[in-house]
Image (cartoon, coloured by chain):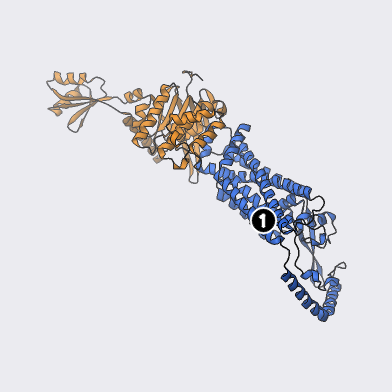
Amino acid sequence: MSRLLRVELRRYRARRVALWVGIGLVGVVVLSTVVAGFDARPPSAAAIRQARVSYQQQAAQWATDGDQIVSDCLASQQADPNPDADHGCDQLAPTLDQFLPAVQHFFPPADPSSVTGASADGGSVDPAIRQVDTSMWRRFGGLAALDDLAPVFLFAVFLVAVSFVTAELASGAIGLWLTFVPGRTRVFWSKAGAAATWAVPLVVVAFALAAAGSYAAYAVVGTVGSAPDGVVGDIAAFTGRLAVAGAAVALAGVALGMLLRHAAAAIGVAAAWLGAETIFRWGMGDLQRWLFSVNLSAWLHGGEVYTTDRCVPSDTGMSCTTVEHLVTPVQGGLFLLGVTAVLSLAAYLVFRRRDVA
Amino acid sequence: MPLDDDVPAIETAGLRKVYRTRRGRTVGVENLDLVVPAGGVHGFLGPNGSGKTTTIRMLLGLVRADAGTMRIFGTPVPERLDEVVGRVGAIVESPKFFPAFSGRRNLDLLAQAIDAPSTRVGEVLEHVGLTDRARDRYRTYSLGMKQRLAVAATLLKDPDLLIFDEPTNGLDPAGIREIRETMRSLADQGRTVLVSSHILAEVEQVADTVSIVARGRLLASGRVADIVGAGGASVRVRVGDAEAARKVLDAAGFAVRADHGSLVVDGVADPAVVSRALGVQGLWVSELVQEHQGLEQVFLGLTEGESARATAGAAA
């Protein structure tokens, strides 16, 4: 097995697709660094001047209409059937901070008020959900923006893994290969192992380069900011989870490629699945807990929060409140493991029995 | 490993393969009992779609048999194919390598898979005359070069049994001759070569033994000379008075037929008996030629007969 794995690793490395995908990832890293360079720049004096002008105009308007707006807000709050409802009527007055362009740093600010998630005000009653909502990856900053690259890296790994097996099936080279190594169990798992093994350095190096590029972009303009406690551990943990996800996605790619035999079919099925999840997610209620994208995010980010609407009849019809639910990283990891295991096992059994042309 | 002449290189019994297609079931191989003796070149003949490639694929574990048993050098396959695959080199239909890799890289990967020494790749490339183009991408190779690379791949293992499935398809005459010489030379080294083909002249020149299949069934098998001999010899006779000669030969019990102004006497081992029978009656032979049936006639006779039986069976 180890000899076959070594041979497959060599073949993987020698493949042109792997080279082109590697070049593509370098391009993505360069692009993300350029974008980080734009984000890192502090606001210009002209932008600050314009913000002050806008604030003064809004404050003047508030002086005229503010009392009425607050009064309307309080009336709406009193009419709300939920006795605990808080419509934020005491926070309606404009402040200068709201108008000044935000200064973005590489490291996220320690202040949870800068959180971008659904519970940005930290208002969730569930401490586990609050922890996820206020995690480093939910805040403004160059580092948090890097997690948007994770799906790109994982897609790249998937692409190479799919083509790794479909190229062999399409060219018929698998037939020649099996005349040298007829044991299909060894052949299948060596291919899967090679794809998973290569995925780890691919995503880790790509993420490390992107992080380094982003850091450098912020450092050049002096907006790195101060590193919060435990940030290195958070980054290492994210990178580790990304590496595991990369290996899982590569295994899934090999399995889909083996099952469907054509790269376009395998990529199309995966894209259609994820597209359907995105389109139909909001109508799925509690089934969101079992979506691939939700569980992948839970695994990568140390948890994921999804929301459902809970509606009850009221005097005015139906009254709905939004309820937050937590998907833990443990569930996310087990889900990924389960999907990978089921796909791999199915592909292995099919490959064992399939006639090779 | 030394060859044991008593153990056939290949032996199948009751082999059967049915393909399920959208149109229903198609029998690829039906109750095939094939024996390929160890050593020499064995021609595996049959028209297109007769089950040759399917049989080879089953032997190599690429296709699952629905029934029957197979042995290679006495080892049951595919159950214990792992044990014997190192002694088998095979090209199934057209060569299939990774198009974007060079010939050498393709062979390197195969050599590493079987733990062959890296020097072996250079040797086999040299053997087939591909050293100069070894670093070029496989997709740039001509058909002949692809075929030679495939031969090189089979030699990586230094096999006792080589299986060539339609090895000369698409090759020019020089390429065909080259492959034929390669097969003969491999057999002369004591290896067994199984060559499947529908080009009979090619096989007749090189094969020691043959098996003829049609519609998945074995029609004949044995030494080439025996199979051709079983078809019998004929004597073509030209006589001044053909009508009188025919009556004489008929009366003497020969099977005679007229053919383009000549008489053809079938089933005659010795032409002298025809000459003597006519001479006794004062009919002198102006031309007498002994004609042997070629493999092609035997093959066509067998396969057309099988086809007619199948058609009649279907009609019934």
Q: Nearer the viewer, residue A51 or A166?
A: A51
Q: Residue furthest right?
A: A83
Q: Amino acid at mark 1?
A: Thr
Which quadrant holds the N terminus of chain A?
top right
Q: Nearer the viewer, residue B55 or A214?
A: A214
Residue A132 lies left or right of residue A1; in this view the side is right
Q: Judge whether residue A3 can be spotted in this image.
A: yes
Picture coordinates of residue A46 (x, y %)? Answer: 72, 71
Find numbered disc 1 in the image and state the secondary structure of the residue it sits on: helix
Picture coordinates of residue B212 (x, y %)? Answer: 39, 30
Chain A tint as drawn? blue
Tell which subunit mark 1 falls on. Answer: A
Picture coordinates of residue B43 (x, y %)? Answer: 40, 28
Name the image quarter holding residue A40: bottom right
Residue B233 lies left or right of residue A59; in this view the side is left
Name the image quarter holding residue A182: top right
Q: Which residue is mark 1?
A: A33
Picture coordinates of residue B105 (x, y %)? Answer: 52, 37
Chain B tint as drawn? orange
Residue B84 lies left or right of residue A304; in this view the side is left
Q: Nearer the viewer, residue B226 or B239?
A: B226
Q: Residues within 10 Å of mark 1 (few under 14, many from 20)?
A: many
Q: Nearer the viewer, residue A250 or A259?
A: A250
Q: Judge whether residue B62 can be spotted in this image.
A: no
Q: Is residue B92 above or below residue A96?
A: above
Total marks placed: 1
Residue A49 lies left or right of residue A9; in this view the side is right
Q: Is residue B289 above or below residue A109?
A: above
Q: Is residue A29 above or below residue B3?
A: below
Q: Residue furthest bottom?
A: A64
